[in-house]
Amino acid sequence: MSIFDGAFINTQLSKHTSIFGLRLWVVIGILIGVLIVFILFLISLCVVSRRRHRRTGDYKTTGATPAKEIQNIVHIPGPHMLRRPAPAKVPEIHVDIGRPEHRVVVKSDRVSSGESKGTVGSGCETTSSFGSGSVGGIGPEVSHLGWGRWYTLRELEDATGGLCPENILGEGGYGIVYHGVLTDGTKVAVKNLLNNKGQAEKEFKVEVEAIGRVRHKNLVRLLGYCVEGAYRMLVYEYVNNGNLEQWLHGDVGPVSPLTWEIRMNVILGTARGLAYLHEGLEPKVVHRDVKSSNILLDRQWNSKVSDFGLAKLLCSENSYVTTRVMGTFGYVAPEYACTGMLTEKSDVYSFGILIMEIITGRSPVDYGRPQGEVNLIEWLKTMVGNRKAEEVVDPKLPEIPSSKALKRALLIALRCVDPDATKRPKMGHVIHMLEADDLLFHNERKSGGGESSRSLNDFQQEHEDSNLDKRTDEGISVQSEHGSGRNNYQSTRGR
Ligand SMILES: Nc1ncnc2c1ncn2[C@@H]1O[C@H](COP(=O)(O)OP(=O)(O)OP(=O)(O)O)[C@@H](O)[C@H]1O
């Protein structure tokens, strides 16, 4: 282009146009600018709509599990696994769980009491991916757990009548629990975790880790979960007869439907559930909030331990020091409350308090009672020490238990709340003591049953001296708490 042409173009571009008298080059500049903005706008529209399409995808509109989930979730029998192939037996489910140094391998073989059994790979191996992903660590990673089902918010809203207040079963520290019915008719309890508390997401993760892999008839089963937007929900099997706290302390009239036998079965079932958490899984699980409102009951009065939100996964043989003591006032073990030192013996302590509560019908701490009776454990110790063991039973009990049965239960409770955590029995040992009927009371017969004339120390000493660690002619192999380790709570008595 010659200088001439350049000057010509310059002249043309500098001419004023009819648009507000603007020069031509200004008008062209504005047009190009508008065009660029328009193109950018179109591009961003495309990107947003593609992203939205990917996120909502097929699984949301159809309610099915996303394809990635289908590949990763390993078979768990049940009505919720509709879209997944159901292999007859999965040899091993690898679960990356908890702290990075933990690797959990849940094997599918069943142990005798009907629960699946968890074992560790080789010690505490290093591998973990849980919690490192999206949505606060509960994104697609959950699918690697090898259990459960991802429910859509829509499904759970439909199941609970739009989280209708009429369907509220109760409210706990971390959220509201709703009764719901899924489209296939399955009754569920949906726990809608509060997100405005920093703990909620953490609890969600802990709970998903802890219960997702657990199967035991005395533990409430977690069926799945929902993570959508700000929502975090857990979907449990529905347990249809309320919780133990309601039956012990609620308005049930002058006579409680909880007979002595029912109460002992509740204690035994709870012990079995806890023994499984402590001794049947690696890493073991410490519940941290054993209390009557966390013991759910079905219509046959079977007990199921719920609310693993506070559970901590422990590496074998290790204790765990927490900076924040959690649990419920009146049930928390002294060493845990004072030092934050958490072991499964903290659960044993809470379980001891629970036994006392079940026997007496009294709350662990009740400020409505006269001084000296406010603290259940102190009152009970005083009563037993003053040879008034028979007077501690719940006045609403329909029948008075035998002296032997009462003393056995009291003894077990007292041993569980030993201030020295190392002296408390393991849950497996507790089961043996509960099952060992006459075993504990050989000495009682020898001494002519004169229990009422002895002090609390005598009471405990006598039973500690009894033949707890011997094989008896009844064929019950009772091992000491220092016995052979895993599953040593399974007696040889046929079940
Ligand atoms: N799977 C379930 N089936 C039936 N009812 C349930 C189920 N899970 C919880 N509930 C009921 O929902 C209520 C609230 O339970 P949640 O575990 O949230 O709180 P909590 O145990 O009362 O208190 P906290 O949060 O302090 O442990 C309780 O009354 C409980 O009985």
Image (tube, grey):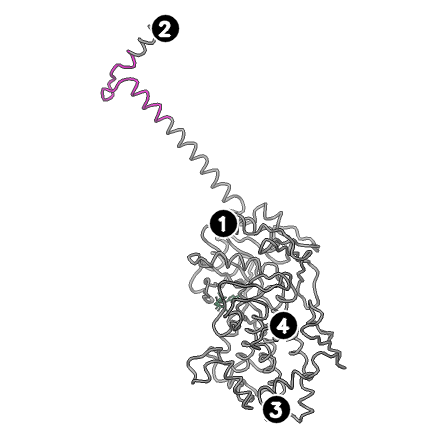
In the image, the segment drawn in magenta is 11-35
For residue 427, the mark is: 4
- Residue 61 rendering spot, x and y as whole percentages: 51, 46
Residue 157 located within the stretch drawn in magenta? no
Which of the two discs, 2 and 4, labels the residue nearer the N terminus? 2
Q: Residues within 10 Å of mark 1 (few under 14, many from 20)?
A: some
Q: Quadrant of the image for the N terminus?
A: top left
Q: Distance between the residues labelled 2 and 4?
A: 99 Å
Which of the two discs, 4 and 1, labels the residue nearer the N terminus? 1
For residue 264, the mark is: none
Q: Quadrant of the image for the C terminus?
A: bottom right
Secondary structure under the numbered disc 3 in the rendered image: helix
The kind of residue on which mark 2 rests is Ser
Q: Looking at the image, is 281 positioned above or below residue 469?
A: above
Q: How far apart are marks 4 and 3 (CA)?
A: 26 Å
Task: Tell me if the residue at label 1 has its CB under 8 Å from ligand 1.
Answer: no
- Residue 104 rendering spot, x and y as whole percentages: 64, 56
- Residue 441 rendering spot, x and y as whole percentages: 67, 86
- Residue 406 rendering spot, x and y as whole percentages: 60, 85
As drawn, the residue found furthest toward the front would be 339
| Residue under numbered circle 3 | 451
Residue 25 located within the stretch drawn in magenta? yes
The kind of residue on which mark 3 rests is Glu
Q: How crowded is mark 4: few (under 14 residues within 10 Å), some or many (20 or more)?
A: many
As drawn, the residue found furthest toward the left would be 21
Q: How far apart are marks 1 and 3 (CA)?
A: 60 Å
| Residue under numbered circle 1 | 135
Secondary structure under the numbered disc 4 in the rendered image: helix
**Which residue sits at x=61%, y=79%?**
412
| Residue under numbered circle 2 | 2
Left or right: 64 as drawn, with respect to 111? left
Task: Tell me if the residue at label 3 has its CB under 8 Å from ligand 1.
Answer: no
